[in-house]
Amino acid sequence: MKEFFSISEVMEQYTSNIDKKAKYSFGELIIRSFLAGAMIAFGAEASNVASHYIQNVGIARTVAGIVFPIGLMMVILMGAELFTGDCMIAIGVSEKKISVKKCIAMLSTIWVGNFLGGIVISLLTYFSGQYNYSGGVLGAYTLKVAISKVSLPFGTAVASGILCNILVCAAVLMAMCASDVTGKLISSFFIIFAFVISGFEHCVANMYYITAGLLCKMNPDYLKAAYDNFGITESQLNSLSIKTFLINNLLPVTIGNIIGGILFVGIPLYYLNISKSKTIRKKVLR
């Protein structure tokens, strides 16, 4: 059994898989994307639990970075459909495997399914009582994280989204380079570890983080803990709403994730490993 696949082989495999993805029914695509949203949400909630009581930012992000990758590991091994990694299916348009309309429809469906998965896990986590940990400090920390995300300037959120999905797409492709489970997990772990430590913005993870923050905002105990432990003011709390969630964060971060996945990873690797090789083969045949 081959131990390692080259990036050229992986890109060939990825583009050939686009045909399979395009044949999914709407229901199948929604279910696969719902599962991916839930899996990423599990990584996000667990990383919050692990880091919420650590005051040193560097150490807190390192701990979160160790835990968060479990989400993408599950996505990779369980055949779920994650919006950020699937942004690269846009190269299927160049290969004439899918139309622009079909590509947009698929990505939109995956985005919605991921969102539903994140919402469900955030609701279940809220009602499980998990945010009561440390006397409600976890709930307060969840609020803090959500507020910080909706407070990002538009351009900053776009740039952070680009950087995030360069790493996420690299992790997906590098996992495909490995032929065994251990190789796939190690490849994805270190890249996602770097993305979390860097604090870049991932739209699907934020579907959990900010939804959870909105839920915690309704709990007076978490509000008091947020003020006592993090000095969060009423004006900061007011900045967290469904409108700011969608407009201030999800919109620019999604735009950034799309740019990062397509323009910085998908198209360059397609050109270097598929388009260019086809051109060379045509010249040889002539």
Image (spheres, helix red, strand yellow):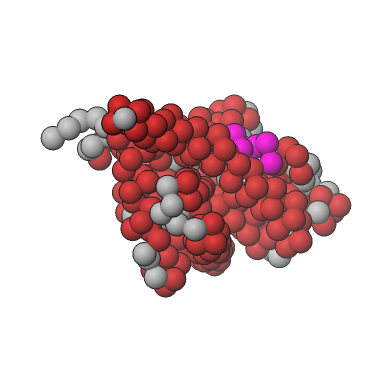
User: Which of these two is toward me, 243 or 83?
Assistant: 83
Magenta extent? 158-167
Give above or below for 38 relative to 90.
below
Where is residue 116? Give x, y as percent: 53, 65
Q: On the picture, is 37 further left or further right than 249?
A: left
User: Which of these two is toward me, 198 or 142?
Assistant: 198
**Which secondary structure dominates the residues rendered in magenta?**
helix
Q: Quadrant of residue 234?
A: bottom right
Whether residue 193 is visible = no
Q: Quadrant of residue 155?
A: top right
Instruction: Looking at this view, name the residue that lies furthest to the front.
Output: 286
**In the rendered image, which quarter contains the N terminus?**
top left
Q: On the picture, is 214 further left or further right than 18?
A: right
Where is residue 42? Give x, y as percent: 46, 53
Q: Is residue 165 magenta?
A: yes
The residue shown at (20%, 30%) is 3
Where is residue 89? Give x, y as percent: 46, 49
Q: Is residue 231 magenta?
A: no
Q: Quadrant of residue 241?
A: bottom right
